[in-house]
Amino acid sequence: MSGQPQNLLLATLTPASRTSLLTRLKPVTLLAKEVIYEPDSIPKYAHFLTSGIASVVSSMSNGSSAEVGIWGKEGLVESFHLLGNAKIPTRCYIQVAGTALRMPFKELQKEFQDNEELRDCILQGVQSHGFILGQLAACNRLHEAEERLARWLLMVRDRMESDTFFLTQEFLATMLGSRRTTVTAAAGTLPPRRHLIYHGGESRAAMIMHTPRTRPVPWQQRKSRVRSRWLQPVIALEWVWEWAAFALSNWAFLEVLEYLSTFSVLIAVIFYFSESGDRIKQRHYQAWQVINTAQGKGGSGGRIEALQELNADDVPLVGVDVSSAFLQGLRLNHANLLRSDFSSADLRNSHLEQSDFTLANLNSANLRNAALNDASFAQADLRNADLTGASLIQADFSGAVLDGTDLRASDLKSIGWQHIRSIKAANIAGVKNAPAGFVAWALQNGAIDQPAADQ
């Protein structure tokens, strides 16, 4: 590679160190929702972003999440992983699609230890990021949603180096750790006079930000800078226009027209909203790409967000394969999961109410404490699945195979059980609200009542 690198950290290195590193870095394109690293895991690659935004997210046990940091082209996304052996509990994924220079993380680890100059630059970046995290903690504690939204938008703007950018309401909600309705309310308090234009529907938001106009200098001062007399009429016309723009900038409507008058911005906004259908298709394609790329692998791999986004847009998830995936806290209410494969998947504390698991493979799935009210498991394979403490109120098990299923302490109120195909060795100890006749029938057909050893 030649030329000045776009990543600011790489740009601070001496030419010799930078060139040595660039020969081993590979340019890559990063799609939105692409996972950079998972919690408590060692990254596969190290990324020096050259464009786009990476979000660092902390997830709670109840499935909620909030953004605790962002990375742009100012540094190395995996900086904190280089500091020692402590596990990093956060998750990082691409929020705004972009590009990066990357290399295997283990190679960078060795370079970090051997190259003092690179180490100093990365540690300085970590220190700066630590200051930002401290400021964010104070802001989150002391400021309301409106102020926190303004802060995040400015941080994104600094990293995008653009006054125009497009974000999702989901992204803004994650940034604030709040609901989308809070985002809408907070954005509504920032009118054009405060240099923010907000356009948004239920799921998309377009942001056009700008800096306030400064008062133009007096004509004599401007004239004194012009060396050639023949240029004075041109400069005078420019100066008059600047004063006219400054005078009119206090009018909110004209302010909007001023920024939309930039042809490229106008075209971008028009195409963005007129081609919303194509954008939705592209978003769906990217979500399916995330799911299919991670097929058969452990970890989340971005599949939680991809599945939830598709389901929120009422896309059928028929036949989806997320076997062995880490999907704790997944929220897929009313989802069409016909013939899906969740075998050996970790779905603890998930919310799957009224979802259709007809003919699904849930063999050895971990559904502990999951909310499965009104779900359909007709003809589903639930062998050796763990449903301990799950809420199964009014769930339908017609034709389902429950051999070896752990149903301890699960809530079986009003379940459809009369046509269960098989329940051999299923553990029904401590089940709650079981329908009349169910327990006796289950024990008669091979189920067991075996409390846990600590009970």
Image (tube, grey):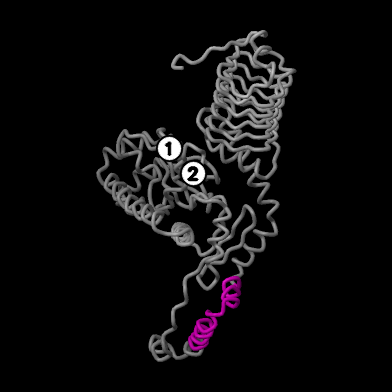
User: Taking 347 as reference, is 307 above or below it?
Assistant: below
How far is mark 2 from mark 1, CA to CA? 24 Å
The residue at the point 64 percent across, 16 percent down is 402
Question: Where residue 115 appears, x then y in whole percent?
Answer: 27, 42
Query: Which residue is at the front of the view, 199 or 389?
Result: 389
Question: Where residue 320 appears, x then y in whole percent?
Answer: 65, 31
Query: Which residue is at the front of the view, 369 or 167?
Result: 369
Main SS category, magenta section: helix
User: Taking 44 as reference, is 365 above or below it?
Assistant: above
**Element carrying mark 2:** strand
Q: Residue furthest front?
A: 436
Which mark identifies residue 45?
1
The residue at the point 48 percent across, 53 percent down is 176
Q: Residues within 10 Å of mark 1 (few under 14, many from 20)?
A: some
The reply, left or right, for residue 133 in relation to residue 188 is left
Q: Amino acid at mark 1?
A: Tyr
Q: Residues within 10 Å of mark 2 (few under 14, many from 20)?
A: some
Residue corresponding to mark 2:
65
Of marks 2 and 1, which one's residue comes earlier in the chain?
1
Query: Which residue is at the front of the view, 194 or 440?
Result: 440
Which mark identifies residue 158?
none
Q: Amino acid at mark 2?
A: Ser
Question: Where residue 185 appears, x then y in whole percent?
Answer: 56, 60
Q: Which residues are magenta?
A: 235-261
Name the quadrant containing residue 215. Answer: bottom left
Question: Where residue 314 appears, x then y in whole percent?
Answer: 70, 42
